[in-house]
Image (cartoon, rainbow, N blue to C red):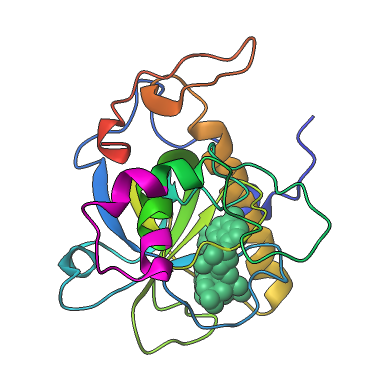
Amino acid sequence: MFSLPNPNNRPLLIGPPSGPEPPYPFRMEGKVISGFGRGSKELGIPTANLPVDDENTWIKHIDSGIYMGWASLKLPASHPNSALYEKPHTTEPVMETIIPSSHEQLKQQHTEEEKGVSPAQEEKNVDQERGQWQIYPMVMSIGYNPFYKNTVRSAEVHVLEKFGADFYGVEMRLLVTGFIRNEKDYSGLEALIADIEFDCEVAKHSLARKGWKVKELGVVREGEEVGELDGSWLVR
Ligand code: ADP
Ligand code: RBF
Ligand code: MG
C-alpha cells in the first residue's frame, strides 16, 4: 500500500495513459553548475542546477512550476554510476585510482593526434570520450522558489536515482514530458519537503506507464512494461 503522506490529497498519476500531450515534450540541455548551496543534499533532495543565462533562452519561455520527465547524464567513466566504471582495486594511495585499466590503451590511440596536449588534459579528453549517456526519471523545479524568495530564476533537477558521487560539470539533457504543479510558498521546511517527496512519487508512477516511458531506457525489470516514448534525443 502507498504509505507516504499525501499533502492535500494530490493525484498520483498525471496525464492520460497514452503519453505526453502537446506542447510536450520539451528538450533542454546544459552542464550542471553549482546552485544556491542550501544543503538540499542534506535534506535528501539534491538538485542538479542548469545555467539560466542569455545563451540558454528556453528557460524564459516556459512557465514557472514543477515538471517531470527524463534526464540523461553523460557520466565520465570515472564516475561510480557510469556503465563503464571499474572499481579501483588497490589499498595503496595512487594518483589514478578512478582511471579504468583500459585507459592506457585508449591513451596510446590518441597520442598521435593529440601531440602538445598536457597529460592532465589528455586524461580528461579520454575520460569524456568514454562517457556514455545514461537515462533516469526526474522531477524539476523552474522558477523563483517562493519559499526562499529568490530574485533570479533557477532550473534545478532532482534525478530519481542514488549516486555514488557528485556530477558537477557533466552534460545533462532533459526531456520534459509533463507539468506537475505550480511552485508554492510554505509555512515550514517540512511542508516543502513533503510536497517534493510526493512530486517524486507522482513522477515515478506517472513515468512508469508505457506511453510515458522512454524506449531507450534499456533494462526493464521482469514484469515491467517496455517504454513506447521516443527518447532518442537523450542519447544521441
Ligand atoms: P547545489 O546547491 O550546488 O546545487 P545540492 O545540494 O542541490 O547543491 O546538490 C546538487 C549536486 O548533487 C548536483 O549538482 C549533483 O552533482 C549531486 N547529486 C547527487 N545525487 C543527485 C540526484 N539524485 N539528483 C541531482 N543531483 C544529485
Ligand atoms: N521551492 C519552493 O519554494 N516552492 C516549491 O513549491 C518547490 N517545489 C520543488 C519541487 C521539486 C520537485 C524540487 C526538486 C524543488 C522544489 N523547490 C521548491 C525548490 C527547493 O526549494 C530547492 O530545491 C531547495 O534548495 C530545497 O531545499
Ligand atoms: Mg541544487
Where is residue 141? Give x, y as percent.
Answer: 44, 63
Residue 50 to residue 196: above or below: below
Residue at (62% x, 55% y) in the render: 98
Q: Is residue 169 visible?
A: yes
Task: Specify the farthest residue to the right.
Answer: 91
Q: How many marks?
A: 0
Residue 16 to residue 134: above or below: above
Where is residue 43? Give x, y as percent.
Answer: 71, 69
Residue at (48% x, 23% y) in the render: 209
- Give the left or right position of residue 236, taking residue 50 as reference: left
Which quadrant would residue 105 be assigned to in this image? top left
185 or 164: which is nearer to us? Answer: 164
The quarter of the image that holds ligand 1 is bottom right
Q: Is residue 120 magenta?
A: yes
109 or 59: which is nearer to us? Answer: 109
Q: Is residue 213 visible?
A: no
184 or 159: which is nearer to us? Answer: 159
Q: Is residue 27 magenta?
A: no
**What span is in magenta?**
107-123
Where is residue 193? Give x, y as percent.
Answer: 67, 65
